[in-house]
């Protein structure tokens, strides 16, 4: 079983409701085959958008899976764009490397285009997979292991006005979700969560705990108003010399610097712990600028959200540019050839137009570099320094690079 002359697999079709269990078992097996708790499985069943999901069938057997959530993504300038959140991709190990993934990507990007969504986005199990389909890594996330016996925090004025109190995570879900929603427009890369998605944050499966406590939650309050929350686990550890526990931070959401500092001060100060671990945080997380010693926080970066411009013109028009840009891009796009060719982008902080042009090109690149630079977190100049973007008109690269930047680094707060 392989693919036809159009690159499509004969067994490829949109999912039907009855397919879900078989399809999902194929997906789980693709990721190692460890079963999920019933509650987790039921949540994913509820979140799956059946008519936007694909399966490949070899006879009765499901051998390929892929989905595309209908998300809204914040882009530079604050607009919220409809995007396809590509997910649940797998091919059975018995059928690997025969073009089945390529076939699903072909069908999916054609569908996303037909749905009128200018971008597809994903997080990759392995970074090497998706560049060939035009996805570029657009955001980085920060991971750190903070030695809280050595690293102190200096907090801003007003921190003492914030009260931190424990709450049961599931009981305060609505309050927390409303706080999260207030942050979404302020940072490129953030996803507006559809109803149901908030439950993922408190699912708390045993498999995620790695010997730590169930999920704990605190609210930050000021004058009776909730201004932030943190979710975390504590892993106690006892050694001959004493306690050496870890606070594993899952989420910190705060509306202002004092609320944020109050939450981090709480997390750094939990008794019987000597380490705070954070993962998937924004690269400009405020605690980085409050700590006495960044080095002992062992910060590390990781690729996070991959962006694919499905419609170059519509995508580039949908964001704004932090400095005036008037540049002709020569775009290469082998997988979605409707994007290939020259596009004139003219824009500034108020808006942009992006149209096909016969004018000479100023900057040449592939759609993958455009995807990487799209949210303002990866500079076109840096990609040019790596030989991945080519300046044709002197000065055009600096102009485009400055315009594409974002004052706030993009961040994807959670996987999907
Ligand atoms: C958004 C998400 O859901 S990410 C999750 C992705 N899924 C997984 O990682 C689960 C485990 N892996 C799998 O299920 C499969 O190996 C997949 C889906 C990654 C690949 O499926 P396949 O059907 O084997 O891919 P396909 O045959 O279409 O390969 C296309 C090309 O990608 C390459 N490729 C495929 N998988 C990988 C990989 N993991 N790393 C590097 N290259 C890869 C192939 O070598 C091939 O290259 P070529 O065109 O130069 O020959």
Image: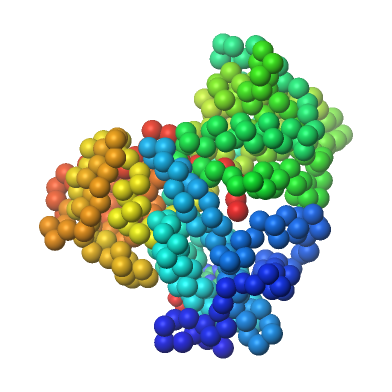
**Residue sitting nearer the eye, 4 or 301:** 4
Viewed as shown, does residue 81 lie left or right of 126?
left
Q: Is residue 293 visible?
A: no
Q: Quadrant of residue 408?
A: top left
Viewed as shown, does residue 220 lie left or right of 335?
right
**Residue sitting nearer the eye, 153 or 52:** 52
Question: Vertically, is 309 above or below 216?
Answer: below
Q: Position of residue 383 (x, y in %)?
A: 33, 51
Viewed as shown, does residue 205 lie left or right of 124?
right
Label count reads 0
Q: Quadrant of residue 36?
A: bottom right
Question: Vertically, is 181 above or below 380?
Answer: above
Quadrant location of the N terminus in the rendered image: bottom right
Q: Residue at left 67%, top 43%?
A: 198
Q: Position of residue 364 (x, y in %)?
A: 23, 58
Question: Vertically, is 247 above or below 359?
Answer: above
Q: Residue at left 52%, top 82%?
A: 9
Q: Residue at left 37%, top 70%?
A: 335
**Residue sitting nearer the eye, 53 or 27:** 53
Q: Residue at left 55%, top 21%?
A: 257
Judging from the image, the colouring scheme is rainbow
Q: Position of residue 102 (x, y in %)?
A: 48, 74
Q: Is residue 110 visible?
A: yes
Q: Position of residue 55 (x, y in %)?
A: 60, 74
Viewed as shown, does residue 316 lie left or right of 41?
left
């Amino acid at each position: 079983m392989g693919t036809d002359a159009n690159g499509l697999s004969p067994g490829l079709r949109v999912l039907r409701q009855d397919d879900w269990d078989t399809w999902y078992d194929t997906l789980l097996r693709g990721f190692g085959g460890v079963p999920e708790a019933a509650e987790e499985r039921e949540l994913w069943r509820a979140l799956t958008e059946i008519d936007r999901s694909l399966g490949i069938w070899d006879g009765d057997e499901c051998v390929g899976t892929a989905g595309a959530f209908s998300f809204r993504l914040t882009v530079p300038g604050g607009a919220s764009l409809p995007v396809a959140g590509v997910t649940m991709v797998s091919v059975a190990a018995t059928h690997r490397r025969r073009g089945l993934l390529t076939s699903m990507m072909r069908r999916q990007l054609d569908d996303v285009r037909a749905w009128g969504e200018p971008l597809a986005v994903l997080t990759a199990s392995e970074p090497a997979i998706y560049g060939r389909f035009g996805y570029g890594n657009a955001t980085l996330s920060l991971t750190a292991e903070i030695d809280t016996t050595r690293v102190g925090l200096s907090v801003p004025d007003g921190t003492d006005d914030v009260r931190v109190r424990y709450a049961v995570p599931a009981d305060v879900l609505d309050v927390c979700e409303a706080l999260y929603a207030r942050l979404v427009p302020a940072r490129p890369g953030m996803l507006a969560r559809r109803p149901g998605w908030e439950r993922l944050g408190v699912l708390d499966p045993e498999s995620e705990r790695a010997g730590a406590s169930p999920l704990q939650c605190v609210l930050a309050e000021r004058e009776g108003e909730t201004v932030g929350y943190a979710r975390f686990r504590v892993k106690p550890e006892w050694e001959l010399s004493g306690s050496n526990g870890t606070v594993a931070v899952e989420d910190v959401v705060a509306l202002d610097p004092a609320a944020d500092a109050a939450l981090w001060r709480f997390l750094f100060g939990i008794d019987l712990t000597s380490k705070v671990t954070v993962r998937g945080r924004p690269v400009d997380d405020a605690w980085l600028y409050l700590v006495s010693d960044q080095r002992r926080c062992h910060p590390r970066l990781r690729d996070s959200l991959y962006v694919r411009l499905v419609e170059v013109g519509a995508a580039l028009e949908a964001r704004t540019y932090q400095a005036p840009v008037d540049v002709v891009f020569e775009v290469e796009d082998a997988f979605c050839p409707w994007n290939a060719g020259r596009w004139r982008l003219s824009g500034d902080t108020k808006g942009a137009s992006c149209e096909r042009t016969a004018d000479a090109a100023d900057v040449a690149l592939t759609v993958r570099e455009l995807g990487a630079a799209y949210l303002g977190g990866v500079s076109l100049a840096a990609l040019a320094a790596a030989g991945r973007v080519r300046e044709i008109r002197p000065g055009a690269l600096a102009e485009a690079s400055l315009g594409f930047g974002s004052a706030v680094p993009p961040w994807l707060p959670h996987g999907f």
